[in-house]
Image (tube, rainbow, N blue to C red):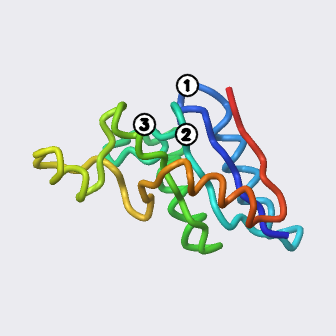
Amino acid sequence: MNYALLVLGGPYSQQAAHSALRFAMALPQRGHRVGTVFFYHEGVYNAARLMTPPRDEPHLLNHWRELHDQQQTQLFVCVASALRRGLLDTREAQRHDMNIHTLEPPFELTGLGQLIEIGLSHDRFLTFAP
């Protein structure tokens, strides 16, 4: 089965992101995969390029990247939630005359229309909220 996940929780403030990541990493053992993860509200902080947790804590950004590499998972970030919280890709940084981008590839900014399409195109759609 092809799963889609909606993550609403920040990376180190709630359990939602950790639970979503652990669920996603366990799916291949059951013959399934995560096709898409959509980050919304505080969940957009999972894509923060400058995330630097202490070395003895899990580095969620790196784990999301591993998920992308292992399962070719699309990592989408709500553009409105991201911009409100200071997360910009290179295109949005240029558009707003900023000289740095704070969204880490392979995360991609997208809109809520994409979220609707994700819900329709995957076998299962799960929400991980605080």
Residue 50 coordinates in the image, percent (x, y): 31, 44
What residue is shown at x 42% (from left), y 54% (from top)?
Answer: 109
- Badge 2 density bin: few <14, some 14–19, many ≥20, Cα 10 Å: many
Residue picked out by circle 2: 40
- Can you tell which of label 1 and label 2 is closer to the viewer? 2
**Residue 80 falls left or right of residue 129:** left
- Badge 1 density bin: few <14, some 14–19, many ≥20, Cα 10 Å: few
Of residues 14 and 41, which is closer to you in this image?
41
| Kind of residue at disc 1 | Ser
Which of pointers 1 and 3 lies earlier in the amino acid sequence? Answer: 1
Q: Secondary structure at mark 1?
A: loop
Q: Secondary structure at mark 2?
A: loop
What residue is shown at x 89% (from left), y 68% (from top)?
Answer: 30
Residue picked out by circle 1: 13
Residue picked out by circle 3: 54
Q: Secondary structure at mark 3?
A: loop
Which of pointers 1 and 2 lies earlier in the amino acid sequence? Answer: 1
| Kind of residue at disc 3 | Pro
| Kind of residue at disc 2 | Tyr
Which of pointers 3 and 2 lies earlier in the amino acid sequence? Answer: 2
**Outermost right residue:** 30
**Image quarter hosting the C terminus:** top right
